[in-house]
Structures are given as C-alpha cells and as structure tokens.
Image (tube, rainbow, N blue to C red):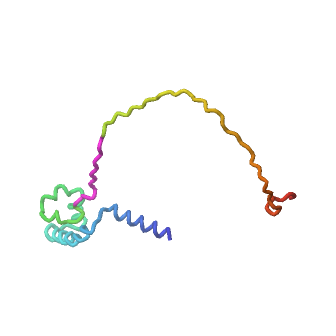
Amino acid sequence: MSKIVAFTYSILILFQSFNIGIEDLSKFGILMEHAEFHKEMYGDTFYQFLAEHYGDAKVNHDNEHDEHQNLPFKDAHQLCSHMNIPFINTTVTFELTHQSFIKIPFNFHYTDSHTNFEKLSVFQPPKHA
C-alpha cells in the first residue's frame, strides 16, 4: 500500500513540475486551431508550428499574430517567486564575566530507616536458589 501512495505522490509532483494548469488545458483547442491556421496559410508542419511558437524561432514569430496571447503555456507566472527578506542590522554584544567559585558545604546525611514492622515470609525473596 505504501508503494502505491509513494508512486501516486511522485506522479503528482512530476505533473506539478510541468506547470500545467486547468486554464492551459482549456486553451488546448485554441492551440489546435492556430496550428491548422499555420498549416493552411504557411504550409507548416505541427513540429514547425511548435518551434515557431515555443522554440527557438519564438522571438521572431511572436509579433506576427495577435492570437499568441491566447495560446496555452505562454504565461510563466507560476515560475515567479516573490520573497521579502528583511535585513535588520542589530548589534549583538556578549559580556563575559568571571565569577569566583563558591564552595557549597556538604550537608548530605543518610540514615537507614528502621521499622518494627516485619514482613511475612511470603513477601521475602527466596533464601536458596
């Protein structure tokens, strides 16, 4: 059972590392329509389309169409990390003082308690082993 849970968690972490959201999945139809537009207008294959919109030719091709903002996987806001780190300059000083040793008087005295109550032989440890 623990292997199934570990496998499920690892698949979940892998899927989350791709930064794919529900909004990106809903825009997948727009991606296919735009790919068809490129195929009809420019004769591009799907691989060329992906290279122009998500690959090396992305910088040159982004200014040609207005539909590029609606394509999925274009926003990288999941990768942003805003952290406020306050820097506080505080002066830390340590004062080391030497205290002389104070001798504590020995006041421990042990006396064995005596009682007149004698225990029965049932509650005594065995005499011979």
> Can residue 56 be found in the magenta stretch?
no
Tell me where residue 49 sits by quadrant. Answer: bottom left
**Picture residue at 24% right of the left edge, 63% below the top:** 73
Report the span colored magenta.
75-87
Does residue 107 appear left or right of residue 75 in this picture?
A: right
Does residue 31 appear left or right of residue 93 in this picture?
A: left
Image position, residue 105 (x, y; %): 63, 32
Image position, residue 94 (x, y; %): 42, 31
Secondary structure mostly taken by the magenta-highlighted segment of the chain? loop
Residue sticking out furthest to the front: 116
User: How many marks on residues?
Assistant: 0
Image position, residue 53 (x, y; %): 21, 61
**Picture residue at 25% right of the left edge, 67% below the top:** 24
The quadrant of the picture occupied by the C terminus is bottom right
Q: Camera-side residue: 84 or 8? A: 84
Q: Camera-side residue: 96 or 88? A: 96
Residue 14 versus residue 81 in the image, above or below: below
Image position, residue 63 (x, y; %): 13, 58
> Can residue 79 be found in the magenta stretch?
yes
**Picture residue at 70% right of the left edge, 40% below the top:** 109
Does residue 18 appear left or right of residue 57 in this picture?
A: right
Does residue 40 appear left or right of residue 118 in this picture?
A: left
Residue 116 versus residue 32 in the image, above or below: above
